[in-house]
Image: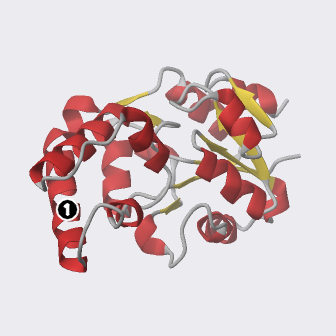
Amino acid sequence: MHEAILFDLDGTLIDSIELIIRSYEHTLREHDKPPASRDQILGYIGIPLRKHLVAYASSESEVQAMMLTYRAWNHLHHDEYVRPFPGVSSMLEALKTQNTKIAVVTSKLSDAAWRGLSHCKLEHFFEVLIGADDVDKHKPDPTPLLVACERLGVEPTRCVYVGDSVHDMAAACSAEMGAIGAGWGPFDADALTNAGAQCVLDAPEDVVGMLR
C-alpha cells in the first residue's frame, strides 16, 4: 500500500507549459540566441533553469543575466497563462479525505512554486513542498524526492511520484519508489514508459483509483 504520493508541479498539478515555452522564447530572443524548438524546450521541463541555460550562455555572467530575463517575463505573465489541470483539485481533496500524505517536489524555486499553487487555489492541500532551493542535487537525481519522504516521515518504498517528464520518472526509479506518468501533461506516454514509468494515467482522477 502507498502511504504517500509526491507530485511534480508544472505539467502535473498546474498547466504552466505555455508560460514556460514563452518565457524561454523571450529569453533567447532578448539575448540574441538561436531559437529553440517547442520539443527542445519541453525537454528542459523537470530540471532546474540554470542547468539548461548554461548550454546557451558564453559565460557565468550571461547565465545569470538570462535567468533574470526568464524569471522577470515569467513573473509578469504568470497569472495570464497558469491554470490548474481539470480534476486536480477534486483529486487532491479525495486524497486528503483518505488521509493519504501528499507533497510537491519541483525543480522550480519554492516561492515560485507556492505562487503557482496559490494562483490555482491548491496551496491549502500541501504542507510539504521541496523546491530547487531546498536541495543541492536535483532531478533526475533522487535527492529532492528522498527529502520529501523524510519530511513526510514515510519510507521511499511506500511512496509514488506522479510526474509528467522523463526526468521525473528517472528520479522516482532512482529513489526506489513507484514512478507514475501524468499522461495529461505534455510528454508522450511511450517516452514516460521508456523512462521507467510503471504506468501512465490518463487523468488526475485516476490517481485516486490507483490506490483502490
Q: Residue at x 30, y 49 (%)?
A: 115
| Residue that mark 1 sits on | 66
Q: Residue at x 34, y 44 (%)?
A: 116
Q: Amino acid at mark 1?
A: Met
Q: Position of residue 181 (x, y in %)?
A: 68, 36
At x 63%, y 71%, the residue is 143
* Image x and y of residue 187, in percent: 56, 32
The one nearer the camera, 200 or 79, is 200
Expressed as whole percent of the image width and height from the top left, the position of residue 151 reads 63, 69
Camera-side residue of 117 and 145: 145
Q: Say how the picture is coloured.
A: secondary structure
- Above or below, comparing residue 188 to residue 13 in the picture: above
Q: Is residue 118 left or right of residue 65?
A: right
Q: Secondary structure at mark 1?
A: helix
User: Does 51 appear above or below 6?
Assistant: below
Q: Is any atom of residue 67 visible in this view?
A: yes
Residue visible at 71% across and 30% down in the picture: 190
